[in-house]
Structures are given as C-alpha cells and as structure tokens.
Amino acid sequence: MDTSYPREDEPPRKRGSPPAAPPPRDHLVWAIFNTLYMNFCCLGFVALAFAVKARDRKVSGDVEAARHFSSKARCYNALATAGSVVLPLLLVALVVTGVIHLSKLAQESVGFFTYQLSGSGDEDQ
C-alpha cells in the first residue's frame, strides 16, 4: 500500500446549484384568525381560501403557484386586518364627536329656552 502521496482530510465538496429559495409562506394562521375574529366583508374567508390553496400547491411542489396564492392571501389578510382595526376606531371617533356636538347643542338649547321663559315672564308684568 503506497502512502507517499498526501491525503485530504476533508471530503471533496459537491459543486451543484446554489440552495433553493425557501418555500413561500401560506399565511394560514393569520387567515384563520381573520376568519374567526375579524371577518370584515368576508375578506378573512377569502384569505383563508387562498391560504389553503397556497398550502396545497406548496405540498404538491408547484412553488410558483404557491407563491402566487400566498401573495393573494397576504393581501386579503392585510385588508381584513386593516378594515377590522380602522372601522371600529372610526366608529368610536364618530360617537365621541357626536356626543360632544350633542352636549354643546343641549347647552345652547337650555340657554335659549331659559332666556325665552324668563323673557316672557317679564313682558307680562
């Protein structure tokens, strides 16, 4: 056995293609949350449908279709979340401004009616 040549301690590295891109996210948990808790105009349900399609395509190996459906699920989830957060805040703001306006109107009416009542009593004498 000839041992005169130098041996390599490390095995030769494989020269292949670079590592593949990670599979797309399906946003399924976010879609389930939007469907159950914040279902604004059924956008949560639509997001859930696209998230399930994205997961099915990812499992079957069609990465491009999975990426497409994942993008749609993300958009519908964002719309459902934004609508479900913005609309209650807008409703609270409208109620607060309405209460403030009505309280000012009530104070002005009380002042008007007390003036009329006290003014009509003075004219009779």
Image (cartoon, rainbow, N blue to C red):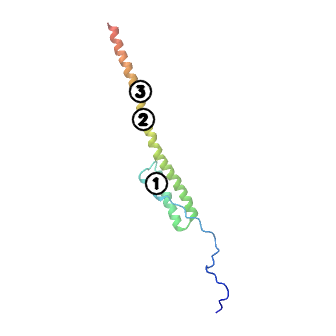
Q: Residue at x 46, y 54 (%)?
A: 45
Furthest residue to the top? 125
Name the residue that disc number 2 marks. Answer: 96
**Marks 2 and 1, how far apart at CA:** 32 Å
Q: Amino acid at mark 2?
A: Val
Q: Is residue 2 left or right of residue 125?
A: right
Tag 2 secondary structure: helix
- Amino acid type of the residue tagged 1 in the rendering: Phe
Task: Tell me residue 75's x, y (percent).
Answer: 53, 52
31 lies above or below 23: above
- Which quarter of the rendered picture does the N terminus lie within? bottom right
Q: In the rendering, which numbered label is found on residue 45?
A: 1
Q: CA distance from mark 3 to mark 2?
A: 13 Å
Check the image and report above or below for 45 versus 102.
Answer: below
Q: Residue at 43% across / 39% down in the picture?
A: 92
The residue closer to the viewer here, 83 or 89, is 89
Q: Residue at x 49, y 47 (%)?
A: 82
Mark 3 or mark 1: name the one nearer the start of the chain: 1
Q: Is residue 108 above or below residue 34?
A: above
The first of marks 3 and 2 along the sequence is 2
Residue 112, x across and y down, in percent:
39, 19
* Disc number for residue 104: 3
Furthest toward the right, the residue is 5
